[in-house]
Image: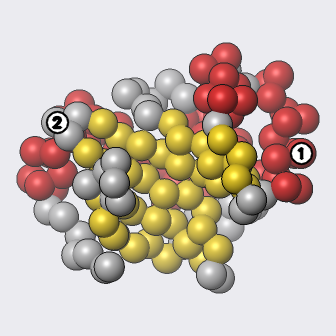
Amino acid sequence: MARTEPTREELAELLGEPLLAVWRELCAAIDERYEMDRAWGPGGKRWDLEYKYRRGGRTLCALYARSGCVGFMVVFGGDERAKVERMLGELSPAVRERYEEATTYRDGKWVMFEPTDASEFGDYLRLLAVKRRPNRG
């Protein structure tokens, strides 16, 4: 079900100002590197909102929001998992641990991060580059 873009005030009320800043900074970092279609949707059972980055019928990543929490999900297929696993030693311990603990389903390994600041964004962007080469900047 499609959803219209929430206002800044609605996002701030849901996330709180500190996490809204994290959300906006992560979106800006992705937007700086990728020209993508973006779509708002319902967040499913665990989240209130979903914000997907897609191009050519493939999802790059999705951000999720619920009261006081931001989620950042990347799904890695088989070939992508092999590439990520070769670079795990170069990632921060927290990002590596989240990747290793994620569940692998038939359609890929679903890795959900819950950033509270920008400290892991460099690793997130490296992971996105495994899925798709940046097409901006």
Give the percent coordinates (x, y) of residue 5: 23, 70
Count all numbered tags in the image, as a single digit. 2
Identify the residue under disc 1: 82
Question: Vertically, is 130 above or below 60?
Answer: above
Mark in the foreground, 1 or 2: 1
The disc label shown at residue 16, or none: 2
Residues 89 and 47: in front is 47
Quadrant of the rendered structure where residue 71 is?
Answer: top left
Q: Residues within 10 Å of mark 1 (few under 14, many from 20)?
A: few
Compare marks 1 and 2 and give the one earlier in the sequence.
2
Q: Residues within 10 Å of mark 2 (few under 14, many from 20)?
A: some
Q: Which of the colour schemes (rainbow, by chain, secondary structure, one colour) is used?
A: secondary structure
Instruction: Give the left or right position of residue 7, taking residue 82 as reference.
Output: left
Q: Quadrant of the N terminus?
A: bottom left
Could you tell me if residue 59 is visible in this image?
yes
Give the percent coordinates (x, y) of residue 2: 31, 79
Question: Vertically, is 42 above or below 77?
Answer: below
Quadrant of the rendered structure where residue 50 is?
Answer: bottom left
